[in-house]
């Protein structure tokens, strides 16, 4: 069936939260996805904790590795005792049973709100088809920041019915997921610029989107781009050099990083494009 996710944006002090059903990770992690749009809307209002919570947290003793109380509170927004009991025949015997009880007790304290109508009006989604790219995504917990425009510029791919609408994997779902979801958005590899190692590093942290970067925050490189979706974008926008290698700019070449059969990062490679009458074939080649 696959892991199901819930986009949780929450205020721990006031016990208010917005939860959006996000389905499988690769179904709703993009800049046009309803769950992403709701998160962006709320984070432009004030700081919130954010968790892209997956239901695999209830299986394989995954909860044993969670020690941060704020993270446990986030899990309590979309899971309760029933979820753990349903997936574990001996839940009361688990060493982390106290965490399960903590989650269950707190699951009853949240006031759930919806921002659907406000989101559609603010972002004019029927026209823009995407959240805005301006500003900075701040992590108040770690004093880090992501330049949203730079992130999107490196992550953008083409999609839509005509194949000429600009989309991207949004950084918020990847940075805040509970685990095991992000790689579903780039199963075969990423662009070499992608920072897929950051997946889950901001899970449950206090985030905010602002127009200007405040003092004391370190900007980190952030980009999440599927190897082939990004390759198609580069071909249509930048084309090829004289050797048939894919460009990623007026002079630079696109570098891809295929994954091994074990899902591990391979070495960076260029992409060769062969165009025939019937199709376009993309393949990776060593960087000379």
Image: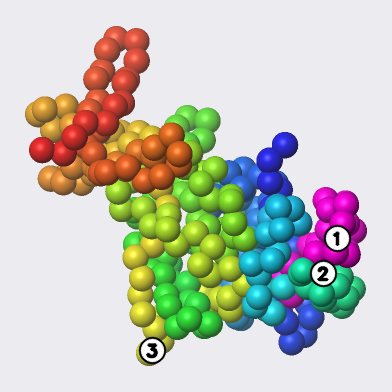
Residue 101 appears in the picture as rendered = yes
Q: Secondary structure at mark 3?
A: loop
Q: Which is more N-terminal, label 1 or label 3? A: 1
Q: Is residue 7 above or below residue 71?
A: above
- Residue at the disc numbered 3: 216
- Residue at the disc numbered 1: 91
How busy is the neighbourhood of tag 3: few (under 14 within 10 Å), some, or many (20 plus)?
A: few
Estimate the x, y position of residue 95 in percent, counting from the top left: 77, 69
Estimate the x, y position of residue 166 in percent, counting from the top left: 44, 45
Q: Secondary structure at mark 1?
A: helix
Question: Is 105 situated left or right of 24 in this image?
Answer: right
Q: Which is more N-terminal, label 1 or label 2? A: 1
Magenta run includes residue 87:
yes
**Quarter location, residue 278:** top left
Q: Residue at x 85, y 64 (%)?
A: 93
Q: Secondary structure at mark 2?
A: helix
How busy is the neighbourhood of tag 1: few (under 14 within 10 Å), some, or many (20 plus)?
A: some
Q: Which is more N-terminal, label 2 or label 3? A: 2
> Which numbered dot is residue 97?
2
Magenta run includes residue 75:
yes
Distance of mark 3 from mark 2, alpha carbons?
A: 39 Å
Tell me whether circle 2 and circle 1 mark residues in contact (CB < 8 Å).
yes
Secondary structure mostly seen in the magenta stretch? helix
Question: Is 58 situated left or right of 279 in this image?
Answer: right
> Which numbered dot is residue 54?
none
The answer to which of 280 and 73 lies nearer the viewer is 73
Residue situated furthest bottom in the rendering: 215
How busy is the neighbourhood of tag 2: few (under 14 within 10 Å), some, or many (20 plus)?
A: some
Estimate the x, y position of residue 205 in percent, counting from the top left: 58, 75
Q: Which residues lie in the magenta part?
A: 73-94
Q: Is residue 94 above or below residue 106?
A: above
Q: Residue at x 79, y 80 (%)?
A: 15
């Amino acid at each position: 069936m696959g892991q199901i996710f819930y986009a949780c944006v929450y205020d721990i002090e006031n016990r208010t939260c917005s939860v959006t059903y996000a389905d499988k990770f690769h179904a709703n992690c993009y800049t046009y996805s309803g769950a992403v749009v709701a998160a962006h809307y709320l984070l432009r209002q004030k700081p919130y904790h954010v968790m892209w919570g997956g239901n695999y947290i209830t299986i394989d003793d995954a909860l044993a590795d969670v020690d941060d109380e704020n993270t446990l509170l986030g899990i309590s927004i979309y899971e309760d005792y029933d979820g753990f009991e349903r997936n574990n025949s001996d839940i009361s015997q688990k060493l982390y049973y106290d965490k399960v009880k903590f989650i269950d007790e707190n699951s009853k304290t949240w006031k759930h709100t919806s921002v659907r109508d406000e989101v559609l009006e603010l972002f004019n989604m029927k026209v823009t088809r995407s959240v805005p790219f301006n500003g900075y995504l701040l992590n108040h917990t770690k004093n880090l920041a992501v330049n949203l425009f730079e992130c999107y510029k490196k992550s953008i791919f083409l999609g839509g019915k005509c194949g000429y609408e600009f989309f991207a994997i949004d950084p918020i779902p990847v940075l805040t997921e509970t685990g095991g979801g992000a790689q579903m958005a780039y199963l075969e590899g990423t662009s070499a610029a992608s920072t897929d190692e950051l997946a889950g590093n901001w899970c449950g942290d206090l985030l905010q989107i602002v127009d200007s970067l405040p003092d004391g925050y370190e900007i980190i490189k952030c980009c999440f781009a599927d190897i082939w979706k990004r390759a198609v974008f580069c071909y249509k926008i930048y084309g090829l050099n004289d050797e048939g290698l894919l460009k990623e700019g007026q002079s630079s070449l696109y570098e891809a990083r295929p994954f091994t059969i074990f899902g591990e990062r391979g070495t960076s490679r260029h992409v060769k494009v062969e165009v025939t009458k019937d199709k376009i074939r993309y393949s990776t080649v060593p960087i000379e």
